Amino acid sequence: MSKLFTPYQIKNLELKNRVVMAPMCMFSADTNGHANDWHFTHYAARAVGGVGLIILEATAVEARGRISEHDLGIWKEEQVEGLKKIVDLCKAHGSKVGIQLGHAGRKSEAMSEPNIGPSAIAYSDDYRVPVEMTKEDIKNVAEAFKEAARRADLAGFDTIELHGAHGYLINQFLSPLTNKRTDEYGGNAENRSRFLKEILQAIKTVWPEEKPVILRVSAEEYGEEGNHDVDVANMIKDLKEEGLDLINVSSGGVINVVPKAYPGYQVKFAETIKQITGLPVMAGGLISSPSMAEEIVQNERADFIFLGRELLRNPYWCLQAAKELRDEITWPKQYERAKLK
């Protein structure tokens, strides 16, 4: 049996394999943040295809935290019903389901309210300058994450992922490139991670202890004065006791720089974070080859492989990968006539 298709358990979450669908924005919700038929079909198809864990796209914890006007939302009770339908559909086909809780901060393109951020620095000339957050703002956003976690539990999600990557609000506080504050939320790494720490402490009051918490990070910011993998690993290590169970390792998005990307270009960052923190990690980045995915988990460079674009191209990647790796996995009975021999 390949290691890629062996089960893994974190707290009460038992996954049937090590393949994770990365959160990818669909920009397909209505302007009130409600899920619709597109989401139901999109996510259920990947469950039918055999993915172990599906993580829903960045879902806004408040309206001004949306990346776009058509992001999914989890800032009000009425949004829970549609999210629960996604969960139920995916679980019916054998996948476990998580949701990425996010706030875009200075990178929000939703125009209903002013942008906010740790400091009044725009992402680029094409973005608005954010309003620097007061301590009351910080408290209110932490409360919004808490309420979002409560709603995620009501919807039946198996895990939540805090979006601390790609230059969105949590990442903006973590990065010295975007956080120029002079109070207890800025300056050294401990202060810059205080906002994340307070969010973790808040969600612990409502999120069940037996359900894991994932953190997605940009382990490399591609700016000389920004965070690098060792910096991020040490910040996570210091927060480990606040309830982090798994780290989803990505990179970039903090500043307007496009990294040189190639298959597996982020795996080395995942290795660093796994080694320094002792936490399990997800690795990815243009991975499409089953043999490459297998090598990464076999050599314990990471515990999970996340796939993004590849699962957009091929929802049934897992079924085909098992054949290439000479493994046996269960096909949907409706598809067994097409099973690869």
Image (cartoon, rainbow, N blue to C red):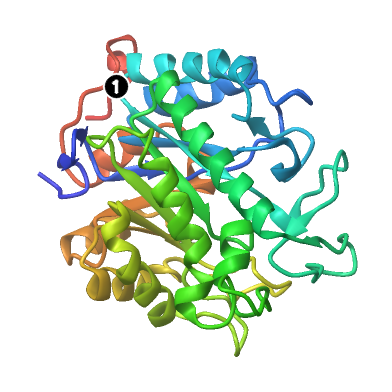
Is residue 90 placed above or below 184 in the rendered structure? above
> Which quarter of the rendering shows the N terminus?
top left
Are there few (<14), some (14-19), or many (20+) residues within 10 Å of tag 1? some
In the image shown, does 79 or 88 lie closer to the viewer? 79
In the image shown, does 235 or 12 lie closer to the viewer? 235
Is residue 157 placed above or below 242 in the rendered structure? above
Q: Which residue is mark 1?
A: 94
Please report the residue visible at 30 percent of the width from the left and 72 percent of the height from the top.
271
Please report the residue visible at 34 percent of the width from the left and 45 percent of the height from the top.
213
Q: Is residue 320 visible?
A: yes
Counting from the top left corner in percent of width and height, residue 178 is at 68, 74
Counting from the top left corner in percent of width and height, residue 149 is at 46, 34
Please report the residue visible at 47 percent of the width from the left and 16 percent of the height from the top.
84
In the image shown, does 46 or 244 lie closer to the viewer? 244
Q: Quadrant of residue 8?
A: top left
Callout 1 amino acid: Gly
Counting from the top left corner in percent of width and height, residue 239 is at 34, 64
Please report the residue visible at 71 percent of the width from the left and 59 percent of the height from the top.
134
Q: State the SS at label 1.
A: loop
Query: Is residue 81 found left or right of 242 in the rendered image?
Result: right
> Which quarter of the rendering shows the C terminus?
top left
